[in-house]
Amino acid sequence: MVRSFVLFFVVLLALSGCARSTSPRLGDASTLSGAGLAAVQLDREPGSFYPLVSGNRWTYDREFFTALRPLGDTVTYRGRERMRVVRTVDCPTTFDGSIWWVETSRTYTVNSLIIEWLRMRQDRNGLYELETIPTPEYPCGDLGSGSASIAEQVVRPLRASGPGTSGIPLAPGRAEGALIAAFRRALEPRLSAMPGSARWLDPRPDGIGTTVLTRLAYPLRVGAEWAIRPEVDVNHEPIFLAHVEAQETIDLPAGRFPAYRIRIDSPLFRPGDVVQVWYGRAGFLALHADVTFSIEGEGGQVIGEGHAIDEVRLAAIGE
């Protein structure tokens, strides 16, 4: 797939797919306090759930799959991108009298690096993200990529695992730019509720302002639910609603972790769409998303069908 198309979704830290994939492998919930759980070496404020302290660092493996079938074609065009994402808590900053912590995400592919950042805050009632549009100046000094040696160390496993991107040839004679733009318009609403993205779907007409998003509502317990965004749709339903589905163990490249599995629902999703995230005391642990959608041209006509899958898994803590 053309590079601009892939990078669009990397920036969003979104959803993905071309063939159905499995969720992170889960253990029996009864083993939550059993042997074999990974040791968590992260700093945290006393009594806090999410380790929101400067200096904490997480590394994630991410695979993003896409499939596109234009109407009238007999071929499905597929793409796959492997990435490594490094997230760090960098420094505190102040907004409207409250302290927010800057969390920076660096997404590495074999050939590129994308850096984005957001502001997080936590209290006894939840974990929050501050969305400000347009994005203000980065408050923690130089927003560089880090040293060349660190970048090489991060990218090396991607090269060793094989080609990072599989190309998607578009149908001969089709306007490539128009097709990709339509694909973006169709998928963006389904990508906007993902943790780790500095850009959420913004329902405000002018797209300018500040919104507080609720990533987690405490105390976490099975059956709890909350609105991620304050806005509602025409039926007065939350645009994105989080439901705690289960408390279980999850096996990841970084080890075995107790986790809460949270399902994200939205009236923007189709029946059968799946968006799930896992959080624990080690932080954000994993994401699984699998969605399908129609692709419309600029005139509103359907010109194709799309399928996307995103798999994100914690690979390392503090490395």
Image (spheres, rainbow, N blue to C red):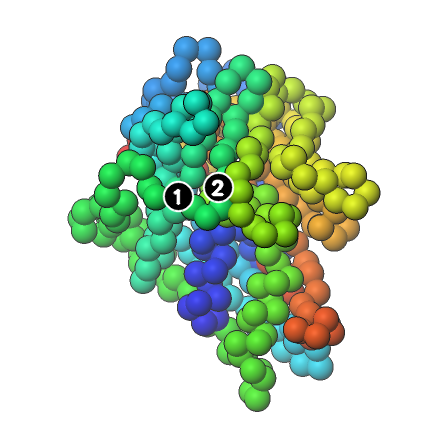
Q: Is residue 263 above or below residue 190?
A: above
Residue at image location 56% in from the left, 69% down from the top: 181
Kindly identify which numbered label has been placed on residue 253: none
> Is residue 56 something one can see in this rendering?
no
Which of the 4 quarters of the picture holds residue 55?
A: top left
**Element carrying mark 2:** strand
**Element carrying mark 1:** loop
Residue ranking furthest to the top = 46
* Left or right of 285 on screen, residue 113: left
Residue 292, given in percent of the width and then of the height, sits at: 68, 58
Residue at image location 43% in from the left, 46% down from the top: 135
Are there few (<14), some (14-19), or many (20+) residues within 10 Å of tag 2?
Answer: some
Residue at image location 39% in from the left, 62% down from the top: 164
Give the alpha-carbon distance from disc 1 to disc 2, as whole Å. Answer: 7 Å
Residue at image location 57% in from the left, 88% down from the top: 173
Q: Nearer the viewer, residue 242 or 128?
A: 128
Residue 307, given in percent of the width and then of the height, sits at: 63, 61
Query: Which quarter of the rendered picture does the C terminus lie within?
Result: top left
Mark 1 — residue?
A: 136
Q: Is residue 179 above or below residue 213?
A: below
Q: Is residue 118 above or below residue 72?
A: above
Q: Nearer the viewer, residue 245 or 54?
A: 54
Residue 154, given in percent of the width and then of the height, sits at: 28, 48
Are there few (<14), some (14-19), or many (20+) residues within 10 Å of tag 1?
Answer: few
Identify residue type, mark 1.
Answer: Pro
Mark 2 — residue?
A: 132
Q: Are marks 1 and 2 in contact (CB under 8 Å)?
A: yes
Residue 34, given in percent of the width and then of the height, sits at: 51, 17
